[in-house]
Image (spheres, rainbow, N blue to C red):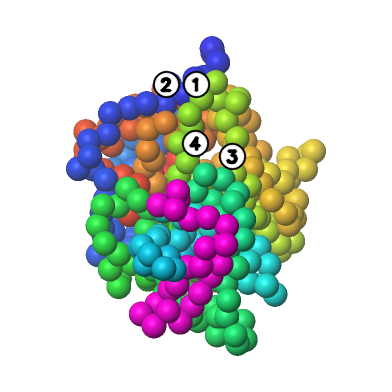
């Protein structure tokens, strides 16, 4: 196999297949099931995922919780409207945050930004990090809980830019998995969005175990690859926590030859970040900038649930590495032909 290039991951995606809204019920989206051993492709509903797993199998889920990261403020003196996207908290004591600003050219060190109808929150720009990146210090008198409540009140759900509509109240719940518990992501781990409480219950009753880890998804997940030579692409670092209990559950399943299914590309990247020499999962707390593209040998999971991804994205490259490049193209051509819905609010794929 010759070396993969960026252009190998292009395909024609009609604009109308991008889902702007989720299905009314989480587990009622469509599910394409792809069998790697035979190349068989089946068309199911998401809740049919139940039929493919048995007692003792393990699903690995990412319990990160999205916070309302997109805020709109006004620049002092001019009153110009500025979008501020909170990337991550740098220092809790001094309320320092890493953010992106838009439009960026007007926002300089020393500028103050005002948020809320009554300018109840103020921030000062204290550093430039990239062309659009800034370090902000929020000026807020009061306990941290009140500050966070203020951010939650003023911020909105950070729907990805390719969803071409205004944020609506329902998004607060729908752009979040039902098992989201550890706040810190600026994008949802979207494969997990399809699991309803009822479906989780039915999986648990069937004896399927859930191993939880945390990867705080950053905006880098949407960053396009701009180099033809994939080895030159650098991923953003994201914070990962794999607890001991999760590692034990996964390794026990592996020892007993049970299925291990990664729910989403974020779970897959997390586990592949922390593999022992004998191919087992190690507990881990730290950062990952792992970029998986073909050819790649996976160590932990033998199945994957994922959404339908954009052309040229790092997510599609991982899918290709997991299912085989030709099968990936075949499945995606079929998805387009069958009008599957793409991206965060779209349909799902189970790769066995």
Give the residue at mark 1: 228
> How far apart are the alpha carbons under marks 4 and 1?
12 Å
Above or below, comparing residue 311 to residue 56 in the picture: above
* Residue 68 in sight: no
The picture places residue 129, in percent across and down from the top left corner, at: 60, 49
Of residues 135 and 105, the one nearer the viewer is 105
Look at the image and give the residue range highlighted in magenta: 103-125
Q: Is residue 111 magenta?
A: yes
Q: Quadrant of residue 80?
A: bottom left
> How far apart are the alpha carbons under marks 1 and 3?
15 Å
The picture places residue 198, in percent across and down from the top left corner, at: 39, 71
Give the residue at mark 2: 7
Nearer the N terminus, badge 1 or badge 3? 1
Q: Residue at x 75, y 51 (%)?
A: 282
Q: Residue at x 26, y 45 (%)?
A: 18
Above or below, comparing residue 215 to residue 122 in the picture: above
- Image depth: mark 3 or mark 4 in front: 3
Tag 1 and tag 2, C-beta contact below 8 Å: yes
Disc 3 crowd rating (10 Å Cα; few below 14, some 14-19, many 20+) is some
SS class, disc 4 = helix
Nearer the N terminus, badge 4 or badge 1? 1
Tag 1 and tag 3, C-beta contact below 8 Å: no
Tag 3 and tag 4, C-beta contact below 8 Å: yes
> How far apart are the alpha carbons under marks 3 and 2?
18 Å
């Amino acid at each position: 196999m010759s070396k993969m290039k960026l252009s190998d991951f292009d395909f024609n995606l009609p604009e109308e297949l991008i889902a702007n809204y989720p299905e009314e019920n989480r587990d009622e989206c469509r599910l394409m099931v792809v069998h790697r051993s035979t190349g068989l492709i089946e068309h199911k509903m998401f809740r049919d995922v139940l039929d493919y797993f048995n007692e003792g199998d393990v699903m690995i889920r990412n319990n990160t919780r999205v916070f309302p990261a997109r805020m709109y403020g006004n620049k002092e003196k001019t009153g110009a409207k500025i979008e501020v996207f909170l990337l991550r908290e740098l220092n809790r004591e001094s309320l320092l945050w890493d953010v992106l600003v838009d439009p960026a050219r007007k926002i300089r060190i020393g500028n103050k930004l005002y948020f809320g109808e009554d300018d109840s929150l103020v921030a000062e720009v204290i550093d430039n990090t990239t062309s659009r990146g800034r370090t902000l210090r929020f000026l807020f008198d009061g306990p941290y809980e009140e500050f966070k409540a203020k951010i939650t009140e003023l911020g909105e759900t950070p729907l990805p830019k390719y969803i071409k509509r205004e944020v609506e109240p329902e998004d607060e719940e729908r752009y979040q998995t039902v098992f989201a518990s550890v706040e810190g992501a600026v994008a949802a781990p979207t494969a997990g969005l399809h699991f309803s409480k009822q479906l989780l219950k039915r999986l648990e009753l069937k004896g399927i175990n859930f191993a939880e880890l945390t990867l705080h998804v950053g905006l880098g997940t949407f960053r396009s690859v701009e180099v033809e030579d994939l080895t030159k692409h650098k991923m953003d670092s994201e914070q990962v926590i794999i607890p001991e209990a999760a590692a034990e559950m996964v390794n026990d399943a592996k020892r007993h030859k049970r299925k291990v299914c990664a729910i989403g590309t974020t779970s897959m990247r997390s586990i592949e970040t922390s593999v022992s020499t004998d191919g087992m999962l190690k507990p881990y707390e730290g950062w990952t900038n792992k970029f998986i593209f073909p050819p790649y040998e996976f160590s932990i999971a033998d199945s994957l649930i994922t959404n339908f991804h954009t052309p040229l994205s790092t997510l599609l490259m991982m899918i290709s590495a997991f299912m085989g490049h030709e099968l990936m193209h075949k499945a995606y051509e079929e998805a387009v032909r069958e009008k599957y819905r793409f991206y965060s609010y779209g349909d799902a794929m189970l790769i066995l």
